[in-house]
Amino acid sequence: MAFKTPRGTNDILPEDQAYWSYVWGTAEQVAASFGFGRIDTPMFEDTSLFRHGVGEETDIVEKEMYSFDDLGGDNITLKPEGTAPVCRAYIQHGMSNLPQPVRLFYENPHFRYERPQAGRVRQHHQFGVEIIGDPSPQVDAEIIELGWTYLSSLGLKNLSLKINSIGDGACRPTYLELLNAHLEHYEDSLCDDHRKRYKVNPLRVLDCKKPGCQSVSVNAPASVDHLCDDCREHFELLKGTLDDLVAAGALIPYTVDNRLVRGLDYYNRTVFEFEPADVKGQSTILAGGRYDPLIEILGGKPTPGIGFGSGVERVILNLKAQGIEVPEARTLDLICVHIGDNARRRLVTLAATLRAAGKSVIVAPEGRSMKSQMRYANNSGARYALILGDRDLEQGEATLRPLIGDGKEVQVGLDAAVIAAEMV
């Protein structure tokens, strides 16, 4: 075959659509239950939005963005992540004038040039939420609770929750100096990428999955041991609120992971992630944190924010791995089987009337024998077949035959309401 999906992309075939509908539907229901409104931002943005917001020294900006000049000469980038575009929209549309905080959720495709592997593709889909305009640790806890509610509502089990605080502009510089001094001592053990640039972005070493960097990060200074008073108080209040949620049964227990960071420059203070206990490699299925500097970086007034993103492909992998059954996509109600040209013409209009009444109906392909049409009907998964021949048309009746279950076929008049009533 000459043409295939580009590397790192996938077709979502009909047999998988039930999983996607289930995940998207659950996401929307949970977001609504927490008072979030939907936002959709463009699939591409000005490249400078991500260079300024995400950070010049990040893997995303240096290696992974799909950027190009359009026909008008503007440099644009397919959206690699969702938070910066939402914050751009917050500034552009004057959302700071709305009652604060503003609660937003989105369901978007994102694009990153990465080495494809299980759970990591170049076009991936994400459910994300953002709360903009409230700096309190209680809001951080609420976002984490929302993440758990979403995952548990899907039926996922055996998950772990990790949290950390990476400080802010007041205390992080001192911590980064200590971390750099530690990494410099073990420079030869770092992977090639981080050996070249750990002094610019040392936090990324803690997140690196390569053995050399992992061995170095085990004994690295912990950010929570070097927080300023404000960040320490914020983190303690967060943990206290999470403890209350755990005691109330609204959240699973958490652990503080000193190596947990986020790969984007705009994060500060709270970071967190959920991952399955028994999945290796690219296992995180929901991750996020606080990004108080981002709105100001993008040109707005200083405004706190926090959110998370959850990769749908990884969630579906885990649903399948845990054997979780999802609701089937809507079953086709009826296939119209015809014997003769006049019968087919009548069924075409009858099918249209039934569809207008809310039934899912198709007419079997033209030019096939009744036996072939019935084989087609049985393979379609339809609940019923409506069989009409030219002779039946003269008598004003058709045969309604159940294709699922043990019901008996009946004769029905050629009236859409009567036929719909028979399809229980």
Image (cartoon, rainbow, N blue to C red):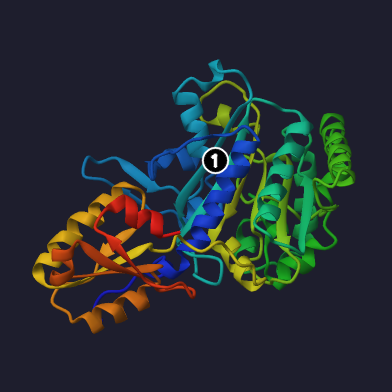
| Foreground of the two, 186 or 191 | 191
Question: What is the residue that sits farthest to the top in this orientation?
Answer: 97
User: For residue 259, what is the image quadrant?
Assistant: bottom right
Q: Give the percent coordinates (x, y) of residue 57.
A: 56, 49
Q: Give the percent coordinates (x, y) of residue 237.
A: 86, 34
| 275 versus 7 height, above or below | above
Location of mark 1 (residue): 83
Q: Give the percent coordinates (x, y) of residue 345.
A: 13, 62
Viewer can see residue 12: yes
| Foreground of the two, 109 or 135 | 109
Query: Which quadrant is the N terminus positioned in?
Result: bottom left
Viewer can see residue 199: no
| Foreground of the two, 175 or 258 | 258
Q: Residues within 10 Å of mark 1 (few under 14, many from 20)?
A: many
Left or right of 303: which side holds 56? left
Left or right of 30: which side holds 53? left
Q: Give the percent coordinates (x, y) of residue 192.
A: 61, 68
Question: What is the residue that sits farthest to the left in this orientation?
Answer: 341
| Foreground of the two, 127 or 328 | 328
Q: Which residue is rendered at x = 56% and y = 56% of the image?
A: 311
Q: Which residue is rendered at x = 38% and y = 47% of the image?
A: 77
Question: What is the residue that sits farthest to the bottom in this orientation?
Answer: 371
User: For residue 266, what is the image quadrant?
Assistant: top right
Task: Name which residue type carries label 1.
Answer: Thr
Q: Which residue is rendered at x = 71% and y = 53% of the image?
A: 273
| 59 versus 164 height, above or below | below
What element does badge 1 sit on? helix
Q: How many marks?
A: 1
| 304 versus 50 height, above or below | above
